[in-house]
Amino acid sequence: MVRLDSRGQAFTLEGFVAALLLLATVAFVLNATAVTPLSSSTSSHHVESQGEALVAGVLDSAAANESLRPTLLYWNDSTGQYHGATVAGTYTNCALPTEFGALVTRTLYDQGWACNVNVRYLNSSNGTTVLTVRPVVDSGTPSDNAVRAVRTVTLYDDEVLYNETSGETNTTLASASTFYVPDADPSSGLYAVVEVEVVVWRT
């Protein structure tokens, strides 16, 4: 009886020691090859996931507070470019002087993200329709881990352009002479359907 108990205790002790050795081995291996969000094998995916969430949140907020449309119409019809834009006709460092621009700056640029904002629309010429991309904010060439998000905005003939203080002017899209998006259907009240694209990457 004593021998059986002793043998059972020995088996139990052996099992316990083996389990400890196995756990110690696993712990050693994990420490030797630790994988964290900052590891080279996962950092790109982690950054992309974070960027996707941020840019989607920015566009969702802009759609909710209706700040995308005034940004598209923040146009100087006399100079043929956005108010206060650079010689190239764009803004840099996410510095778009509208409510949407402030949201982009606060959520993305101030948190260490670079961004490009583009307006995409169809342009018909000589019977051919092509997708045209108009840069609004140009912060440089996106990195390999850049992500993008897009929102669609419908513009109408009777919508007015905005001045440099974001106030409405008397110039409608139908009467504007330099607005970059062409009237898709002059015979109707619909002016054009455009996409606002935001591309972000970690700096």
Image (cartoon, grey):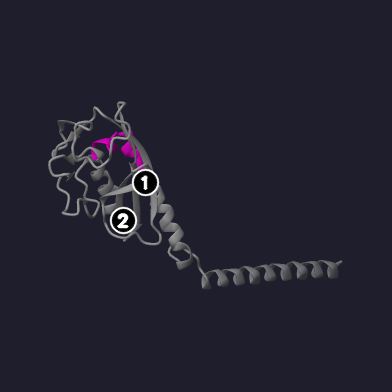
| Residue at 21% from the left image edge and 51% from the top image edge | 91
Residue numbers of the magenta segment: 55-71
Q: Find the distance from the CA under tag 2 to the CA under tag 1.
A: 27 Å
Specify the farthest residue to the front: 126
Considering the image in quadrants, where does the N terminus appear? bottom right
Residue 164: in magenta span:
no
Name which residue type carries label 1.
Answer: Leu
Q: Classify mark 2: residues with Cα within 10 Å, few (<14), some (14-19) or many (20+).
A: many
Q: Position of residue 26 (x, y in %)?
A: 60, 69
Closest to the observer: 53 or 13? 53
- Of label 2 and label 1, which has the lower sequence position? 2
Q: Position of residue 107 (x, y in %)?
A: 30, 48
| Residue at 44% from the left image edge and 53% from the top image edge | 49
Specify the farthest residue to the right: 1
Name which residue type carries label 2.
Answer: Trp
Q: Classify mark 1: residues with Cα within 10 Å, few (<14), some (14-19) or many (20+).
A: few
Q: Main secondary structure of the magenta part?
A: helix
- Which labelled disc corresponds to residue 131? 1
Q: Is residue 128 left or right of residue 163?
A: right
Q: Secondary structure at mark 2?
A: strand
Q: Position of residue 115 (x, y in %)?
A: 30, 53
Which residue has dot 2 on it?
113
On the image, which quarter does residue 57 sit in? top left
Q: Is residue 96 left or right of residue 142?
A: left
